[in-house]
Image (cartoon, rainbow, N blue to C red):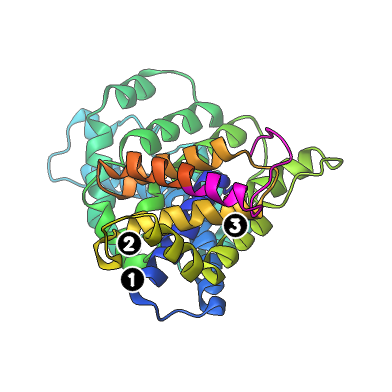
């Protein structure tokens, strides 16, 4: 589930927390990293679990319309395609899925305002009207509809972010990533596959598909990356400050420092990852978390310091291999 880019981001957030406070032990840092990784999969489960409350609310509205004092013909004979969708039935009857969301307390019950708001939004969309007008009543068709819902109704929904922050400190920045895996799950379910909890690390999934692969574990990658950056932080930090002529350490942006330190740690710790890949990864990450001009600063600083460390014999590469 978790690939190298998001794992680098998670390591960066932990290291940034240490850079700001200086009050974290290595064990605490590793524990926070593990918690952050697992939280992304929990968010995936939470978002997938909204299928049932959306469906239940649609059924509830149909029933309320029928019970009106003067129901219309449409109230009495509504289109129940969405309210009777097969995806909700499948998830409701999947013991593994239900057991997990119950054990983890991933319920939408306190957030009925958002559920109603999302349902109102869905009902106004052209993709929903097209779905309701189609005579195709199949699990595949229902999965395609919910894929559109996950793609269009949540990332820019301002109401959802306070909910995510309330549920977990790790969730707010991971929503788009979790939704991507919800959509992948819907593709599999629509193709007739049974729901299964995604492997937490992408390398685990890929190694299952190709057991003979000698691919490095993504879990080992991110833990070594953070451990080496954490234990070598002071040395890397001093190297950065020494290269900034005329600057004092308190003028350096902590976000930039954390990204550069991680980049130096990666360059030094992983001979099989090309320098160009490492630099590009942290420059790209910086575009989401720091100031506009920081990307070029991080790019130049990492290039200069990695070249310096290579000349000292601290960095050597096995070849231009992919990360």
Image vertical order of residue 17 relative to residue 82, above or below = below
Q: Which stretch did the figure color magenta?
A: 305-323
Instruction: Residue 222: give its label.
Output: 3
Image vertical order of residue 32 relative to residue 280, above or below = below
**Alpha-carbon distance for marks 1 and 2?**
7 Å
Tell me whether circle 1 and circle 3 mark residues in contact (CB < 8 Å): no
Horizontally, residue 193 falls left or right of residue 275, namely: right
Density class for disc 1 (Cα within 10 Å; few <14, some 14-19, many ≥20) is few
Q: Residue at x 45, y 79 (%)?
A: 24
**Alpha-carbon distance for marks 1 and 3?**
21 Å
Q: Residue at x 51, y 45 (%)?
A: 5
Nearer-the-camera pick, 135 or 184: 184
The image shows residue 159 at horizontal and vertical percentages of 22, 52
Horizontally, residue 26 falls left or right of residue 178, namely: right
Q: Secondary structure at mark 2?
A: helix
Q: What is the magenta segment's predominant secondary structure?
A: loop
Horizontally, residue 10 falls left or right of residue 34, namely: left
Nearer-the-camera pick, 13 or 168: 13
The image shows residue 295 at horizontal and vertical percentages of 34, 41
Q: Residue at x 71, y 49 (%)?
A: 204
The image shows residue 323 at horizontal and vertical percentages of 63, 40
Nearer-the-camera pick, 219 or 136: 219
Q: Earlier in the sequence, mark 2 or mark 3?
A: 3
Q: Which residue is mark 1?
A: 20
Horizontally, residue 296 falls left or right of residue 93, namely: left
Density class for disc 3 (Cα within 10 Å; few <14, some 14-19, many ≥20) is many
Instruction: Residue 254: give its label.
Output: 2
Image vertical order of residue 101 relative to residue 138, above or below = below
Figure label count:
3
Tell me whether circle 2 and circle 3 mark residues in contact (CB < 8 Å): no
Density class for disc 2 (Cα within 10 Å; few <14, some 14-19, many ≥20) is some
Is residue 321 in view?
yes
């Amino acid at each position: 589930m978790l690939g190298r880019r998001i794992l680098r981001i998670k390591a960066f957030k932990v290291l940034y927390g240490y850079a700001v406070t200086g009050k974290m032990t290595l064990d605490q840092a590793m524990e926070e990293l593990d918690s952050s990784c697992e939280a992304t999969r929990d968010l995936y489960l939470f978002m997938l679990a909204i299928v049932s409350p959306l469906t239940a609310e649609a059924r509830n509205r149909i029933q309320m319309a029928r019970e009106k004092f003067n129901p219309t013909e449409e109230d009495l004979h509504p289109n129940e395609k969405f309210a009777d969708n097969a995806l909700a039935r499948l998830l409701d009857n999947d013991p593994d899925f239900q057991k997990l969301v119950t054990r983890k307390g991933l319920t939408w019950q306190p957030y009925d305002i958002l559920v109603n708001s999302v349902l109102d939004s869905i009902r106004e969309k052209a993709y929903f009207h097209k779905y309701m007008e189609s005579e195709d009543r199949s699990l595949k068709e229902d999965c395609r509809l919910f894929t559109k819902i996950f793609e269009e109704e949540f990332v820019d929904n301002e109401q959802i972010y306070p909910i995510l922050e309330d549920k977990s400190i790790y969730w707010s920045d991971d929503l788009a990533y979790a939704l991507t895996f919800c959509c992948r799950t819907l593709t599999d379910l629509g193709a007739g596959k049974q729901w299964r909890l995604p492997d937490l690390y992408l390398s685990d999934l890929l190694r299952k598909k190709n057991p003979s692969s000698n691919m490095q574990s993504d879990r080992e990658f991110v833990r070594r990356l953070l451990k080496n950056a954490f234990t070598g932080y002071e040395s890397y930090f001093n190297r950065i400050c020494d290269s900034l002529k005329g600057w004092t350490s308190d003028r350096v942006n902590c976000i930039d420092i954390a990204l550069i330190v991680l980049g130096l740690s990666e360059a030094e710790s992983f001979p099989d990852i090309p320098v160009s890949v490492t630099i590009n990864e942290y420059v790209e990450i910086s575009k989401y978390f720091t100031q506009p001009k920081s990307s070029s600063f991080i790019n130049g600083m990492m290039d200069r310091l990695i070249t310096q460390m290579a000349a000292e014999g601290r960095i050597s590469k096995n070849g231009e291999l992919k990360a």
